Amino acid sequence: MPGMRPSLAPFLSSLLLLSCSDPPAPSTSNDSGSSSGSSSSSGGTEASTGTSSGSADTTAGTGSADGSTTSAVDDTSGGGSTSTGSGESSSESTGEPPANGCADGEREAFEDEATYPDVAGCSGGWSVPGVLVNNPACDREGGDDGPNPNGTGCSVEDLCSDGWHVCASRIEVMDAGVADCNEVAFGGAFYATRQSGMGSDTCAASGVNDVFGCGDIGHTMIVGCAPLNRSSANGCVELPDPWSCMTSLTQEAEFLIKGGPEFGGAICCRD
């Protein structure tokens, strides 16, 4: 037994050496941890780099957003154009003639709207008898340039545009700005008003004998009618076809019709 002691010493010495060498192992482990930390740090750096990339992407995204914004502006511009186009379309879609006094949008007498803003001479026909009728009968489709130039089913009022009417009297024509119909050119036509009288070619506040108006055809020997200068005379004998007073010789204001667009129509005054 005393002889074994020397053999244990080296073993213990080895244990002691191992014990002494243990501390570095954690250090190595720590180094590994540090290394891992470094790796993590690297990973973090990569992540950071990734974030940078993300930033780059974001920047790119911003660029896209700018592009989108530009696109949006373009779209807005397009929208504006569409809106403008819509406005133009709306303007074109109305298709209504201007309210210049005549239902078909075309004046044949007192053509200068600046000089005569409130009175218009409108050619066309009508089949509802008389000039005293003050309501349209064919939805104002009369007029020589309208869809119903002969005036079938129309009254004299259908020659005037909405907001206008056949002038009721010589006074209304004068108030509308006509001083003397003899100073106006009518192109071989007669334009009737609702002005009539009691006979004797004289304008009066009442009566249905004769129809008075303006023109360069028709009866000229009339009394008390200024600024009007012409009349139908008895039985419309002074007016050519398609003017007709039917069979009446003394009630022209109640029976006057016109079967076509030629040779005039009516004088319309603004409401």
Image (cartoon, rainbow, N blue to C red):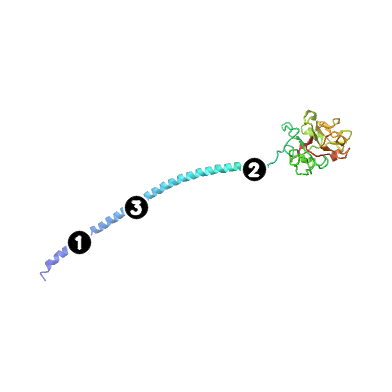
Please tell me how many numbered marks the rendered image carries. 3
Q: Amino acid at mark 2?
A: Ser
Q: Position of residue 181 (x, y in %)?
A: 79, 30
Residue 90 numbered tag:
2
Marks 1,3: beta carbons within 8 A: no
x 56%, y 43%: residue: 78
Please provide percent x and percent y for residue 72: 52, 44
Asked if residue 6 is positioned above or below residue 202 in the image, the reply reads: below
Q: Residues within 10 Å of mark 2 (few under 14, many from 20)?
A: few
Who's the residue at 59% across and 43% down the image?
A: 82
Left or right: residue 61 compared with residue 119 = left
**Mark drawn on residue 18:** 1
Q: CA distance from mark 2 to mark 3?
A: 65 Å
Is the C-beta separation of discs 1 and 2 under 8 Å?
A: no
- The residue singled out by tag 3 in the image is 43
Where, by quadrant of the figure, is residue 104 drawn? Answer: top right
| The C terminus - image quarter | top right
- Quarter location, residue 118: top right
Q: CA distance from mark 1 to mark 3?
A: 36 Å
The image shows residue 123, relative to residue 15, as above or below, that is above
Q: Sequence-wise, which precedes: disc 1 or disc 3?
A: 1
